[in-house]
Amino acid sequence: MQKNFIEELRWRGMLNDMMPGTEEQLQKEITAAYIGFDPTASSLHIGNLATIMLLKHFQLCGHKPYALVGGATGMVGDPSGKAAERSFLSEETLRHNESCIKKQLEKFLDFDGGSNSAEIVNNYDWFKGISFLDFLRDAGKYITVNYMSAKDSVKKRLETGISFTEFSYQLLQGYDFYWLYKNKHVRLQMGGSDQWGNITTGTELIRRKESNNDETSEHRAFALTTPLVTKADGTKFGKSEGGNVWLDASMTSPFQFYQFWINCTDADCPRLLRVFTLYSKEEIETFEQQHAEAPHLRIMQKALAKDVTIRVHSLHDYEMAIAASEVLFGKGTLETLQRMDAATFTSVFEGVPQTIIKRTELENCATVTDLLSTSTHNEIYPSKSEARRAIQGNAVGINKTKVTDENAQPDFVLLQDKYLLVSKGKKNHLILVE
């Protein structure tokens, strides 16, 4: 028996609002629904992941999900939640972003699942053939300016100014819903709570065009939104010190991604586990109970980081992130360092001070004391005597191995065939051997 989608959202805290009749429609038959993603960047971020999870649960409950990449609406920009108009991207940039986003969405949804296989559509495919006059006749005449001006996304901008381009965005999005309703039998649009106004413009356009204002007509379209994810203190969720947390490994490395989740607060974890993971209610409650009994083990954070990192990246990337965390914060060993791939190694030690020496300089270096001082241009320790004192004080490690003999030969294994990792107490320093 398939799970009830609305009940699934309720216990996960993922249901914000829905139009009357939505739950009855979903219980009556397999229903198609869509969520739109504007290609304003070459990657989605974890703010988008909350709505991707809506589509994921929708499909797991037996329904058919559509992901719409806004190749056309991305040229305009959604005013929802924006204090100022966005800069326009070139068509070439938008097409590149669309392609990248499609690849990301394919990692989350099942596109070969029979009758409820996921599909990706691009609204540029239908908007490119519509003239301005045709659009005014087919869509503009059905929605009044009064109706559009009453939307929160517009009202908030009327005082500071909103261009006709952004003002018309809700009409474009409404037409998307109408086109999908007519051509793909999509009955439901979903999104974040800030999209309610745009979504209901679509349901209203469908009602007016198809039903001639007859409320008893079978031409019904539905809307559903999920709450925007915020932290327990009410602040916006999804940003790190470096800005957005992206789903693209080249923009936010798997190690940085893993660290973002593992550093979530105890207060935030119960909600994040429900929104961003596929764990069951029973599993999440077990994590919460175990965490309450031993908070120092950070069981909720580890469960959260594991599930999301594996699904967004891979099991390999998750294992590399664990190894990297051990190196930086735990009892990592030389073997741990050697297991790390080049991308993880670079990500972990990004920003760590580096000293560059020639291979011949390393080969001609007589002792580890020389290596830590004169051979590295006194950038690690300013003199041989300070290097000796640090070694004698048990404060120096190379490649996660304590250095105890100040006169030992520096015949260490090169990490990634070019690095030595020097640990000065709790601080790291890299020697790059060219």
Image (tube, rainbow, N blue to C red):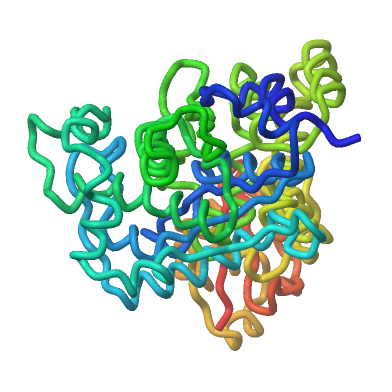
Residue at x-position 83% and y-position 29%: 280
Image quarter (top left, top right, bottom left or bottom right) of the C terminus: bottom right
| Res. 404 visible in picture | no
Q: Residue extending furthest right?
A: 1
Q: Position of residue 8 (x, y in %)?
A: 73, 27
Residue farthest toward the top in the current orientation of the protein: 293
Coordinates of residue 428 in the picture (x, y in percent): 57, 52
Q: Specify whether residue 137 is in view.
A: yes
Image quadrant assignment for residue 298:
top right
Which residue is nearer to you in this view: 388 or 282? 282
Q: Nearer the viewer, residue 219 or 144?
A: 219
Residue sitting at x 62%, y 58%: 422
- Relative horizontal placement of residue 24, taking residue 74 as reference (left or right): right
Q: Where is residue 362 in the image (x, y as percent from the top left)?
A: 62, 80
User: Looking at the image, how many numbered discs can be counted on the residues?
Assistant: 0
> What residue sits 53% from the left and 65% below the top?
250
Name the quadrant of the N terminus: top right
* Identity of the residue drawn at 82% across and 32% down: 3
Please say if 64 is above or below 12: below
Q: Where is residue 343 in the image (x, y as percent from the top left)?
A: 63, 68
From this view, report whether residue 367 is shown above or below residue 329: below
Image check: 182 left or right of 325? Answer: left
Side of 193 where 117 appears, left or right: right
